[in-house]
Structure formats: C-alpha cells, structure tokens
Amino acid sequence: MTPLLEDALSSVIASLESGVAPWRKPWSSGKIPSLPLRSTGDAFSGMNAVLLSSLQAMRGYDNPFWLTFNQAQEAGGHVRKGERAAPAILYKTRCVDGDAGDGSDDKVLRFLKSYGVFNACQIEGLPDSFYPAPDVEKPEGGAPLNEDVLAIMQNFPVPVSHGGDVACYYILSDRISMPPRATFETDEDYVAVLLHEFGHATGAKHRLDRFEPNETRADYAREELVAELTSHLTSMHLGINPSRSVFANHIAYLGHWAGFLKEKPAELLKAAGKAQAAAEMILSYRPATAKFDEPNLSEAA
C-alpha cells in the first residue's frame, strides 16, 4: 500500500474514531450529493467513490471533478503550488506462466496501485466545463420520490412490511421490516434507510452470498459497513440527500469500524468492493422507461 493511500485511509479512520462517518458529511449541508468524477466526466466507483467523496467532504471541496497532474495540464490548467494529492486506486492483473517442468498452471496475480489526483478546486485555469453550476439545495420538506427510486422500491425482490420502529432485514425469511414512512423526517431519510436494508438483502446466499455461517461481532460490524456504503453509493447515483439524523441507528458501529480498520485498513477496500456489487444489483431494478404510481408506505402491512 502506497504512503499516499495509507495517509488517506488514516484520515478516514481518524474521522470514524471521532464519531463521524466521513462519506456522509456532504449530506449534512442539504445539497444534492454527486459521485466523484474523472476528467472525462465518468463517475468513479467502489473504493474510489467512497474515498474521494470522503476526502472531498473532509477538505471542503464542492466540485466533483478529480484530475491527475498531467490531465490538469492537458486541459489547460495547473495545480496550485502546495496542494496535496488524493489517492485514486487502480486494480491490475498480471498473468504468470506456469512452470512447464512441473506441470503447474498459469496464475493470475491481482494487485492494486494508487496514483495521485487533485480536485478541480485545487486547480486553476480549467475550462468552464469543469466547474458545474452550484448544487441546487433540496426544497424545504423534501421532494417527491423520483421514478428510479420508485422502480427500485416496487421491483426489488424482497418484501417490505411497515410497522414498529425498527428497520431490519431478516435473513431466514428474506424480508425487510421498516418503520412507517411518515415517521421519518423526510422521504430522503426513508429511502436512505431502505437502501441500507436492501444492501443487507443483497448478501443472501441466492444473491451475492456474503454472510458468514458462524458470524462474529466483527463480521456483523463488517456487514453493517457494507450496507452503509451500499446506501451511500446508491444514494449518490440517485441524488438522494438524507439528513444526518438518518444514521443514528448505525452510529454505534463507528467504533467497531475504526477498530478493525485501524488493524487492517484493507478491510475498507474490501467493504467498498462488496458495496459496489450490492449497489449495482440494487440499481439494476430501475427500468428507465416505466411509469410508477407512488405507493402508500405509511401504513403497517
């Protein structure tokens, strides 16, 4: 692991130790979240999306674009003197030929490397296309759920019942229980919690097969981290902007996450990879052309 990546992960872990999930900071301002973007306008994914959105929040950047030093120069800009780079991760594979003498098979080695990127806020002279219009703040009282969200809610293959005051995914019966939608401060809060539970549901054996047979407390905390990151990545794709209060039920896990991430920082990379797969599965249930009537979710089922 490179010093640049180690330093960035240390910043994230320190934030968790202080009682804050750094990837959630952008949402406390009420602005619509955005996935970190490459110089081409394509979105980063997985650990890059988690790490860069966290650093973007901690450093106070309000621009989604991240460029390498050379990309900034090629675009006509220049990185300001003294600015610190952030790490972006590149996964690589290398094929090693087997030894013909002992009949061993070829091996595929997987490894990662990091490279430095700078936020557009750290760069001067870029074209206007790298400085999008300011985020529109969400209207007071929230906005109606968009069609992608409604599609996912109606098509995700896990039944959701409403009632009580606990949000939970039940593995044995493969179902989700949610408090009534009316009990949440905003619809965005409701959807963010539901996406967290959808994240758990993707781990079922007949889906992504993520659960440990003899689950320990650490395994449970890891799964909560995957579900939390799944909700974060999916929410950024959908433009969901919940308030900070929505994470009160998960705040107790911050200490657990900080503990095992401090011992094994690579666990965050693993969790982000699993969350990316879970988010992609959830997002696959949003047909772009269908029209959906908004369901009544305030009554117990």
Image (cartoon, rainbow, N blue to C red):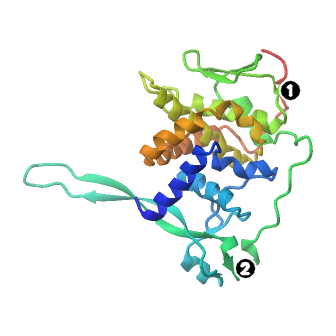
Residue 40 in which image quadrant: bottom right
Left or right? Give the position of 95 relative to 230.
left
Name the kind of residue labelled 1 in the image. Answer: Ala
Mark 1 residue element? helix
Does the CB distance between marks 1 and 2 fall below 8 Å? no
Q: Which residue is mark 1?
A: 182
Q: Residue at x 67, y 55 (%)?
A: 35
Q: Which residue is mark 2?
A: 127
Left or right? Give the position of 117 relative to 181.
left
Of the 4 image quadrants, the one containing the C terminus is: top right
Labelled disc at residue 145:
none
Name the kind of residue labelled 2 in the image. Answer: Pro
The x, y position of residue 240, in whole percent, is: 76, 45
Residue 142 in which image quadrant: top right
How many other residues sit within 10 Å of disc 2, few (<14), some (14-19) or many (≥20)?
A: few
Left or right? Give the position of 293 relative to 43.
right
Of the 4 image quadrants, the one containing the N terminus is: bottom left
**Residue 152 visible to an observer of this rendering:** no
Q: Residue at x 50, y 33 (%)?
A: 208
The x, y position of residue 210, in whole percent, is: 47, 31
Q: How many circles with numbers are drawn on the protein?
A: 2
